[in-house]
Amino acid sequence: KGFDLREGETSPPKRYTSGSMILAMENAGQLIEDEELRSRIKGSGIGTSATRAEILKKLVNNKYLALNGKTQIITPTQLGELIVEAVNLSMPPLLRPELTASWEKGLTMVQQGEISEADYMAKLRDFVARRTGLAAGQSASYKLREAFEASRQYYPAVTEKRRAVRRKGGSK
């Protein structure tokens, strides 16, 4: 009863601008399903209001992101995509806002005297040591090569630049 078929095309989501990215960083907690962790990050998000713009600036300066000076639209660079892929293959929790929220929870517990600063730092060191050990023991180079090859089509200028450098005997 009452079906209508309409033809249409979906449109991609709008690109992030520097302003919308800062707002997304501020509201990163909305992506967390765990109620307690979401409440921990709700007021803080990723970074602080004073550091979010600096985080973006550093990502652009390191060439992980490209910022269009006229439109302020942010796009990932090939290097940025490959770094995210490397982290996703080796330490996926680093890409999730839940990790930031759990760190905020730990800091709050230290502040309220529920755990000592030394205990909290020991837990952080243990986390970093375990994750680094896991990453060091993995050989994900073949998966990174696959990601690089898949991304090449979107970065033809980068690929051509590398070829030109190789033809001239450079090391890139």
Image (cartoon, rainbow, N blue to C red):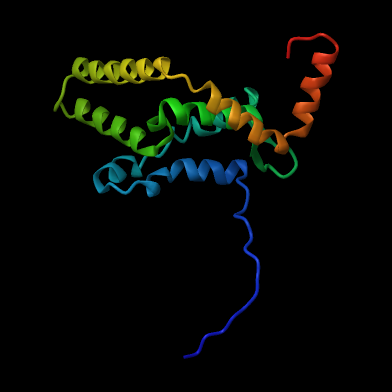
Image quarter of residue 124: top left
**Residue 67, above or below 32:** above
Instruction: Let me know if residue 17 appears in the view.
Output: yes
Image quarter of residue 166: top right
Where is residue 1? Give x, y as percent.
Answer: 47, 91
Q: In this view, does 170 lie to the left or right of 79?
A: right
Instruction: Let me know if residue 68 appears in the view.
Output: no
Query: Residue shown at 36%/15% (left/top)?
Result: 133
Name the one closer to the observer, 6 or 80: 6
Quadrant assignment for the C terminus: top right
Image quarter of residue 11: bottom right
Q: Is residue 106 left or right of residue 59?
A: left
Where is residue 102? Give x, y as percent.
Answer: 29, 33
**Residue 13, above or below 145:** below
Name the one closer to the observer, 21 or 53: 21
Name the one closer to the observer, 132 or 28: 132
Where is residue 51? Give x, y as percent.
Answer: 49, 30
Where is residue 13? Give x, y as percent.
Answer: 59, 55
Q: In this view, does 159 lie to the left or right of 90?
A: right
